[in-house]
Image (spheres, rainbow, N blue to C red):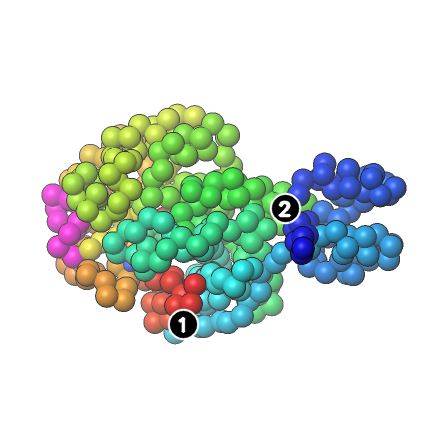
Amino acid sequence: MIVSKPDIREITTKALEDFFIKHNAPKFRASQVKEWLWKHRKINFNEMTNLSIHDRNLLHEHFIINSLKIIKKQISVDGTIKFLFFVNENRFIEGVIIPQFDRLTACISSQVGCSLSCTFCATGKLKLYKNLSSGEIYDQVFLLNEYALKYFNRPISNIVYMGMGEPLLNIKNVLKSIKLITSKNGMGMSGKRITVSTVGITKMIKKIADINPNFNLAISLHSANDIKRSEIMEINKTNNLKKLSQALLYFYEKTKIKPTYEYVLLSGINDSIDDAKELVNFCKKIPSKVNLIEYNQVEDGAYEKSTEEATGLFISFLEKHNILVKLRRSRGEDIAAACGQLAIQNT
Ligand code: SAH
């Protein structure tokens, strides 16, 4: 019988300390190993040079190190870069670097595929294959940062959990990954530069509020009308707008973090002045900001992006009602790296 060895990155420091004690080694080896694993992201025990050969062999005998590999890169005419990562079990995910004047944003995935089936999203057309582990999420940031340092001469400045999957349905690993990204023993980045995006799983929004988060929250809203929202986002049937605003109020009161609403403008679907009015009313409930997103074409997608005129009128209406609003232009559309386009053929 083949017994597969556990992934050392998935076990606690305490369990690793117990392992070393059991094998007559000092327990501080555990923190040395953890530092190699995260801070230096060594994926080979032989590179852990302050451990004896004996200890390296011991680790090798009992554990594996699961890690992601970049297997393909595509560069858009606008400079956006899409990365294809190989995940264990013969799966693939995508991540993106979006260079802007003052920032270098990494857009990362939290799941292989997605279970939510939002009608306008390419990832939503896939099945959910698996949750990524905290290590697999961390790897995306580490590897994109390594790339950024090499090719842009500066580190990743912002991280958005807006790639494939629904972060709040993999909350345990997402929170663990954020801990690693922000920890001094990991990448030491500021949580203020991290945004987790969700379709609005209300139970989890409250749960996050209770743990005093150090990161930002974005909600994929896309309509402030229950009937319309349920048509384009299945999740609204069980987590409707009333539940969502209650959860967000709870979140805001506990954390004082203003949520950002993401709103993809779909021509003739959610871009009229009546839609804008409903959005204003929804926004007034909780201090918040709005990011309007240009719709990106999805294969056999039934939608079209809003016209410049409709977009302009929509923005003016929100501004007239004192809503903080930004328009996010499409990035990386030519290589299918833009919002909602991540869907590898062979996942
Ligand atoms: N599941 C999470 C994380 C994915 S974020 C969430 O939905 O928030 C991806 C963002 O891109 C979401 O705001 C999503 O609604 C948006 N999006 C999906 N399809 C899109 C498309 N075709 N064009 C533009 N944005 C899209």
Q: Position of residue 5 (x, y in %)?
A: 68, 52
Q: Residue at x 25, y 46 (%)?
A: 233
Which residue appears at 22% of the width and 49% of the height? Answer: 232
Q: With 274 as the anchor, is 343 left or right in this view?
A: right
Image: 313 above or below 202: below
Front-most of 271 and 24? Answer: 24
State the residue position of label 2: 10
Amino acid type, mark 2: Glu
Q: Examine the rendered structure and indicate whether residue 101 appears above or below residue 216.
A: below
Residue 325 located left or right of residue 101: left
Which residue is identified by label 1?
A: 76
Q: In the picture, residue 184 is in which quadrant? A: top right
What span is colored magenta in the figure?
267-275
| Residue 328 x/y as whole percent | 32, 56
Label 1 secondary element: loop
State which quarter of the image contains the N terminus.
bottom right
Please state which of the two labelled residues, at mark 1 or mark 2, is closer to the viewer: 2
Can the viewer see residue 341? yes
Q: Give the amino acid at mark 1.
A: Ser
Along the line of sight, the residue nearer the viewer: 335 or 307: 335
